[in-house]
Amino acid sequence: MKLLVYGAGVTGTPFAARLHEAGHDVSLLARGERLAALRRHGVRLAEGTGQVVRRVPVPVVEHPAGGYDLIAVFVRAHQVDAVLPSLAGLDGDVLFLHQWAAGPAPLGAVIGPERVLLGFPVFAGTMDGDVVRLRPATFLTRLSPMPIGEPDGRTTPRLDRIVRAVRTAGINARAEPRMDAWLKTHAAFAVPLEQAAHAAGGPAALAGDPAAVRRMVRLMRQHLAALPTPPVPRGFVALRTLPEGLLVAMLRRFLRGSTAAHSGLASASPAAAAELERMAEQLRAQARIR
């Protein structure tokens, strides 16, 4: 598979490295200082705070040309509008792998609806200079496969081909027939959680404020009630049906645990704040449409 990975951050970089090592024809798109660092040293990966840095010689491009079988887009939600025009000028199917609650229509309107696939990344980490430090996998993340799907839920030859290619790289991928609903459900839960954690100064601080957790739960429920379809996965129905007090207690316990501590919920970077605002706008628009 000839693959362009659009976005050389903490999610796109390890994805490109894994597919390259699996023997696929991969190019990693980067610009500016990130491009210069990749050209000097190649992709550099480390696990958590470990001292071992692994180098992977993934080819890097600044101005991609030629046809691709697949373009995998790893950018934040608020950056999508800026990259769509350049994607329209490239050949190949486009798999968007990021938070997104606006559905496939605004993507397809620019690049062509027949080219759009939706998914969600499984990699997470931080940048340490030019080294991507992957967050340690938890039991929960190890059980969570990378979902990839057609916007209309069909099982197509291209979807099967992409899932197989990702699996060859040792990534636990699966076809998700309700990918758009999955992304909307994720946003309904994740946006209030991340906003509350950032406002409190981190997950542990949020856990110590039961009133803030209660407000967060109520906002999650509002977003879930506004979904145009039932939540996906079905387990999120519990956020609408369990007693509020029980949910508050469960989420406070989660926020005090190691999974939350290593999840990035404490990040308050400008990019994270901008993405959250864009996602909140998409959720508000969804509620108005319904």
Image (spheres, rainbow, N blue to C red):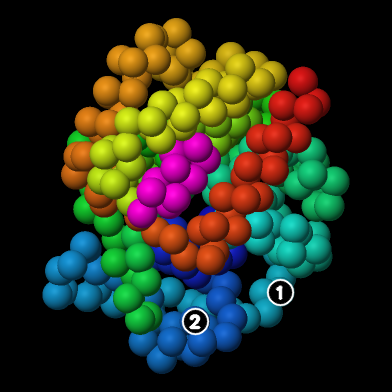
Q: Earlier in the sequence, mark 2 or mark 1?
A: 2
- Residue 116 lies, in percent from the top left, at 71, 43
Q: Nearer the viewer, mark 2 or mark 1?
A: 2
Residue 64 in the figure: left or right of residue 217: right
Q: Is residue 33 above or below residue 135?
A: below
- Residue 188 lies, in percent from the top left, at 55, 31
Q: Which residue is mark 1?
A: 65
Q: Which residue is mark 2?
A: 34
Residue 278 in the figure: left or right of residue 259: right
User: In this orientation, does residue 245 appear?
Assistant: yes
**Overall secondary structure of the magenta section:** helix
Magenta residues, as a range?
190-201
Which is nearer the eye, 4 or 231?
Answer: 231
The quarter of the image holding the C terminus is top right
Q: Check disc 1: other Cα within 10 Å, few if <14, some if 14-19, many if 20+.
A: few
How many marks the image carries: the answer is: 2
User: In this orientation, does residue 122 appear?
Assistant: no
Q: Are marks 2 and 1 in contact (CB under 8 Å)?
A: no
